[in-house]
Image: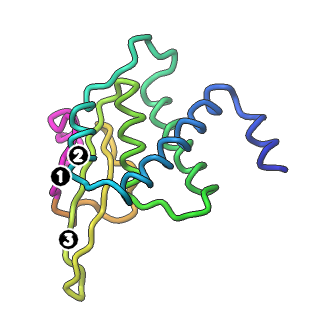
Amino acid sequence: MSRLLKFFSLPRREKQLFCEAGILLLLSNLSVKAVPFRHIDSFLRARAHWHDIAACPFSTADEIELIKLSLSRVTKLLPWESLCLSRSIAEFIMFRRRGIPAVMYVGARFSENSSLVAHAWVCTGREATNVNLDNSTYTPLVIIGQEQTSKRFIES
């Protein structure tokens, strides 16, 4: 009951982003489990230039923070564990729908015991989001989005 009261006490914009994040995270979880990645890849590449026609009343930095906060709130409430790929897909879609330049990376590296470890993350120009480990240790295998926009921020 306290979670429900907390939800209703949120500002309208945060409620909207929370609901959108929940729906996109559910759909991306289902897609990762049921659809071959080549179809997900082509879907994201075809829609990498999404943007809202109406101007957003918030600054880009505020919008990025609200999106990340909404996704983390939803992830904590879901009864299943969301993989980094599902979170990155949902986050990438939310950013691109708002015209925020974003790049989604899917990378791999070898661990100490010679097993292959994969990770997905999103960069929004100034910073990488969905970072659990040092992304520089991963070799990017799939790059979706406008790489030239955020490449300079990754290297610095």
Q: Farthest residue in the front direction?
A: 34
Is 102 on the left-hand or right-hand side of 95?
Answer: left
What residue sits right under mark 2 in the picture? 41
Which comes sooner in the sequence, label 3 or label 1? 3
Residue 151, position as x, y percentages in the image = 18, 41
Give the structural element (helix, strand or loop) at label 2: helix
Task: Tell me the magenta residue range.
Answer: 140-154
Q: Amino acid at mark 2?
A: Asp
What residue sits right under mark 1 in the picture? 142
Q: Is residue 147 magenta?
A: yes
Report if the CB atoms under discs 3 and 1 are less than 8 Å apart.
no
**Mark 1 neighbour class, 10 Å CA radius: few under 14, some 14 to 19, many 20 or more:** few
Q: Amino acid at mark 1?
A: Val
Q: Residue at x 60, y 57 (%)?
A: 78
Is 23 on the left-hand or right-hand side of 116?
Answer: right
Q: Farthest residue in the top direction?
A: 54
Report how far apart the C-alphas of labels 2 and 1 lie in the structure: 9 Å
Marks 2 and 1: which is nearer the front? Answer: 2
* Depicted 115 relative to depicted 39: above or below: below
Q: Is residue 32 magenta?
A: no
Q: Residue at x 44, y 54 (%)?
A: 29
What residue sits right under mark 3 in the picture? 109
**Mark 2 neighbour class, 10 Å CA radius: few under 14, some 14 to 19, many 20 or more:** some
